[in-house]
Image: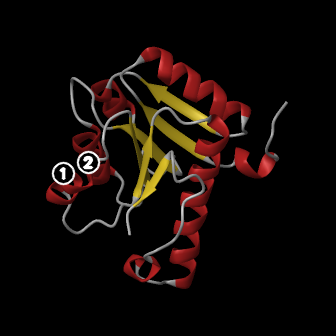
Amino acid sequence: MHSNTDEARRYRIFLVDDEQDITYSLKKGLENEGFEVEAFTSPVIALRNYKPGTYDLALLDIRMPEMSGFELFRKIKEKDGKIRVCFITAFEIYYDEFRRVFPKLKVKCFVRKPVSISVLARVIKEEIEWREEMIKAEAPIEQTKGRTSLDKQAVVKIK
């Protein structure tokens, strides 16, 4: 049974995590929440198969052997300047490293594993809808500092 209505189904997620069991669990769980998910365990293969303008959000693991999630995001951003991203990691949040790689980008969605599917689904939906509202309002992203996360244990929103 889907816990969300068809409203969430319109959201397409591009998921990349090098751990096959995690990728499978996240894909199935998010699909059960009504999302469409295209999942990969290799960032190199994911990049080759990325279709610009297709996805509402990229959900990228940070630590992967072939290419970090930050590097993958940089390459995806070259193909699709409008893609939104949430980084997911079992390790400490690497915001300082992200700022060095992307000094001008205002990405603030970092999710810590393990995370429940219901929390992850809410975070993804919140991130997509928040970005859509900012685009509609034509508000600079910097004006939205301090928005809160749904689960402070699992989600770190940088203020």
Residue at image coords 18%, 65%: 103
Task: State the image coordinates of residue 2 (x, y, percent, origin top left).
Answer: 81, 35
Q: Is residue 68 left or right of residue 125?
A: left
How dense is the environment of label 2, judged by Cα within 10 Å: few (below 14), some, or many (20 and up)?
some
Residue placed furthest toward the left: 100
Q: Give the image quarter of residue 82.
A: bottom left
Q: Which mark is residue 19?
A: none
Tell me, yes or no, whether the two marked residues, 2 and 1, touch with CB atoms within 8 Å: yes
- Asked if residue 84 shows in the view, the reply is no
Task: State the image coordinates of residue 12 (x, y, percent, origin top left).
Answer: 58, 44
Q: Is residue 118 above or below residue 80?
A: above
Closer-to-camera residue (153/59): 153
- Asked if residue 56 shows in the view, the reply is yes
Q: Amino acid at mark 2?
A: Tyr
Q: Give the image quarter of residue 58.
A: top left
Q: Amino acid at mark 1?
A: Glu
Position of the C terminus, as image quadrant, is bottom left
Q: Is residue 122 left or right of residue 4?
A: left
How dense is the environment of label 1, judged by Cα within 10 Å: few (below 14), some, or many (20 and up)?
few
Task: State the image coordinates of residue 71 (x, y, percent, origin top left).
Answer: 22, 42
Q: Residue under label 1, please give it.
A: 97
Q: Total number of numbered labels?
A: 2
Q: Residue under label 2, please give it.
A: 94
